[in-house]
Amino acid sequence: MSGHSKWSTIKRKKEKTDSQRAKIFTKVGREIAVAVREGGPDPASNAKLKDVVAKAKANNVPNENIERIIKKAAGETGGANYENIVYEGYGPSGVAVIVEALTDNRNRTAGEMRHYFDKYGGNLGQSGCVSFLFARQGVLLVEDEGVDEDALMETALEAGAVDFLHQNGVFDIRTEPNNDFGAVREALESAGYGFLSAEIEYVPGTMTALTSEDDVKNMTKLLDMFDDNDDVQAVWHNWEDG
């Protein structure tokens, strides 16, 4: 559901069709359900659930949907046993790719990931093969229309943000990938700010350009395949024109 360059992803998100939005709701719903089963239905005492609810709201999941998923998950004693798996690999011409998945069948999902990479000019690698190229950071994006930059920056930095950027009509606020993320997000929410995106991401340290038209087509198709897979929760990459 995410990637880099981040602004390209957000523009793409804004243009989602109804069917694509339904896929997003399904994926975020699965994350909410897993968080409830692991830590309970109260966001006040379940930090992971609180983070996922914020992510859901940034993806325009209606509040009633969120509440319904939480209640359903809280009342379930059985159901699918999902595990979180991170896959790493290379796309066309060495683009680094990280895929986060929630799956109830790791063999099925691993086979699908390997097939996607192979089909579109890349390869699935071992754990750690590309993650060293990324840094884990909390990333909060706020559209700049009608927003006082100084006031937003002051609120974010006082709450613990470590970086503040303004580009392409978006304020990009960075935090450490720990409790600081939740603290900054809550401070901004309390001040009345909404988010285009709010989650802990894999942020690439360097970007890779694709000059071949075939590579661009294959990378685009690879990302589309990930987007269409229900097990895939998020995709991070260092394609600079992604």
Image (cartoon, helix red, strand yellow):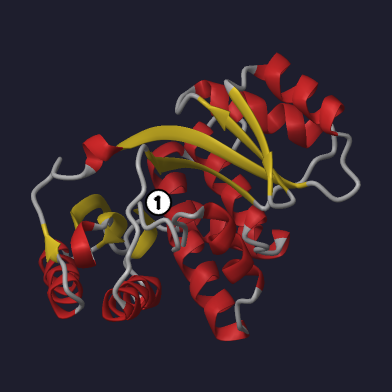
**In the image, farthest residue toward the front:** 211
Location of residue 17 with respect to 123 vertically, above or below: below
Name which residue type carries label 1: Val
Q: Where residue 29 sits: x, y (%)?
A: 50, 62
Q: Where residue 121 sits: x, y (%)?
A: 17, 74
What residue sits 23% from the left and 63% below the top?
A: 104
Of the pair 15 and 71, the residue shown nearer to us:
15
Location of residue 142 with respect to 2 vertically, above or below: above
> How many residues crowd around disc 1 within 10 Å: few (fewer than 14), some, or many (20 or more)?
many
User: Does residue 76 appear to the left or right of 98 in the view shown?
Assistant: right
What residue sits 63% from the left and 24% below the top?
A: 183
What residue sits 60% from the left and 61% below the top?
A: 10
User: Dot 1 lies on which element?
Assistant: helix
Q: Where residue 143 sits: x, y (%)?
A: 76, 50
Q: Which quadrant of the figure has residue 89?
A: bottom left
User: Does residue 91 appear to the left or right of 49 in the view shown?
Assistant: left
Location of residue 57 with respect to 140 vertically, above or below: below
Of the pair 234 and 43, the residue shown nearer to us:
234
Point out the image quarter for the C terminus: bottom left
User: Does residue 26 appear to the left or right of 13 in the view shown?
Assistant: left
Of the pair 218 and 55, the residue shown nearer to us:
218
User: Does residue 90 appear to the left or right of 239 in the view shown?
Assistant: left
Q: Which residue is mark 1?
A: 34
Residue 238 appears in view: yes
Of the pair 224 and 220, the residue shown nearer to us:
220
Q: Which quadrant of the figure has residue 130?
A: top left
Residue 42 appears in view: no
What residue sits 74% from the left and 27% below the top?
A: 187
Q: How many labels, in total?
A: 1
